[in-house]
Amino acid sequence: MRVLSGIQPTGQAHIGNYFGAIKSWVAQQELQDSYFTVVDLHAITIEHDPKELYLGTLELFATLLAAGLDQDKCTIFVQSHVAAHANLAWLMECTVSMGELNRMTQFKDKGRGSESVRAGLFTYPALMAADVLLYQADKVPVGDDQKQHLELTRDLAMRFNRLYGEVFTVPEPSIPTIGARIMDLSNPTKKMSKSSSSPAGIIYLLEPADQIKKKISKAVTDTDNCVEYDPQNRSGISNLLEIFGVATGKDPRSIAQSYSSYGALKNDLTEVLVTNLAPIRDRLNNLLDDKAELARLMRMGAEKAEITANETLRRAQDAVGF
Ligand code: ADP
Ligand code: NA
């Protein structure tokens, strides 16, 4: 079974990325033939700062390693380091129709109406199709926001195969093995996201202990001081219980039973997070201190990815008549 997952290097990784995705990727890497990619090509579909992108990509790659992904058990690479992605994306742009791209709701939400919106944001689903198809992935874990794009990837794989011959595995969507859905601490009805405007609601993986304490103590709750797991009616406290649960492997409901005040729960949750994140932060700092080793690991990932990607690209190019 081959699986591909990606993460965008736009903004710093946070506990939502870790407990919701990266932690389960680490568990999965032994069980499946897994490819994990930092999708920097996608990051330039919107305005960006080159230096920030460079450093953000480096840091996110290092973060995946620090969290426990191991280049000997899976393949971790930066998308732009494997030239086949941009190359196959062109073949996909010449397979997809304007009508299909026009129907993508994410583009409608993000880009509609603006003359200056980058063309790459419009054609992004063709690049995403290339990302997946290059590795002949059987399964792609997708959240709700990516379902329509994966549906298009499947259509394009089938169309290409029909027009030019069997080249691509048609991937199945898989429900991501979600550790949890972590909400924003300042606005617990919204998911914690790198692209959120206010950092107060986000706990970054690199967050120092005193900042974690401050952010948890300011996390929005109601004023009832009633520790109860009820995501519908008590989203703030339930989110804290959820984070506590996913970090300790305990059930949020049973955690709720052992607390009778928000303050005590917040203190212990701070401890738990500091203890969970400290080793990741230490490993990350060590990795970032040794840029030569990091560069070696990046090259290693790209070379491993290229073995599969280049073979698929060659077959696709032969098929269209190049
Ligand atoms: P972000 O919204 O922070 O930019 P990405 O889109 O890069 O995150 O997603 C990377 C991975 O992290 C995906 O698998 C996504 O489902 C997961 N993820 C992102 N935010 C959360 C969250 N708040 N809770 C749980 N999982 C999350
Ligand atoms: Na593996």
Image: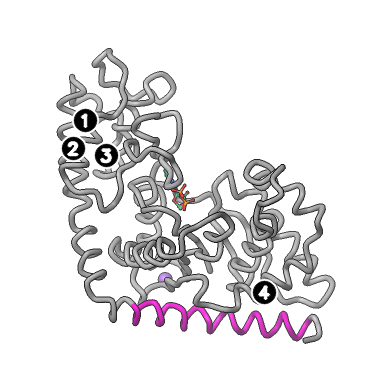
Label 3 vs label 4, nearer the camera: 4
Is residue 158 positioned above or below 224 on the image? below
Location of mark 2 (residue):
213
User: Element type at marker 2?
Assistant: helix
Location of mark 3 (residue):
250
Location of mark 4 (residue):
88
Q: Position of residue 148 (x, y in %)?
A: 67, 49
* Mark count: 4
Q: CA separation, marks 3 and 2?
A: 21 Å
Q: Position of residue 120 (x, y in %)?
A: 65, 60
Reading the chain from its start, which is encountered first: label 4 or label 1? Answer: 4
User: Element type at marker 4?
Assistant: helix
Q: CA separation, marks 3 and 1?
A: 21 Å
Location of mark 1 (residue):
217
In the rendered image, residue 48 lying in the magenta stretch gets the answer no
CB contact under 8 Å: marks 2 and 1: yes
- Magenta stretch: helix, strand or loop mostly: helix
Residue type (three-letter) at the residue carrying disc 2 = Lys
CB contact under 8 Å: marks 3 and 4: no
| Magenta-tinted stretch | 295-319
Reading the chain from its start, which is encountered first: label 3 or label 1? Answer: 1
Is the distance from the Cβ of mark 4 to the nearest ligand 1 atom less than 8 Å? no
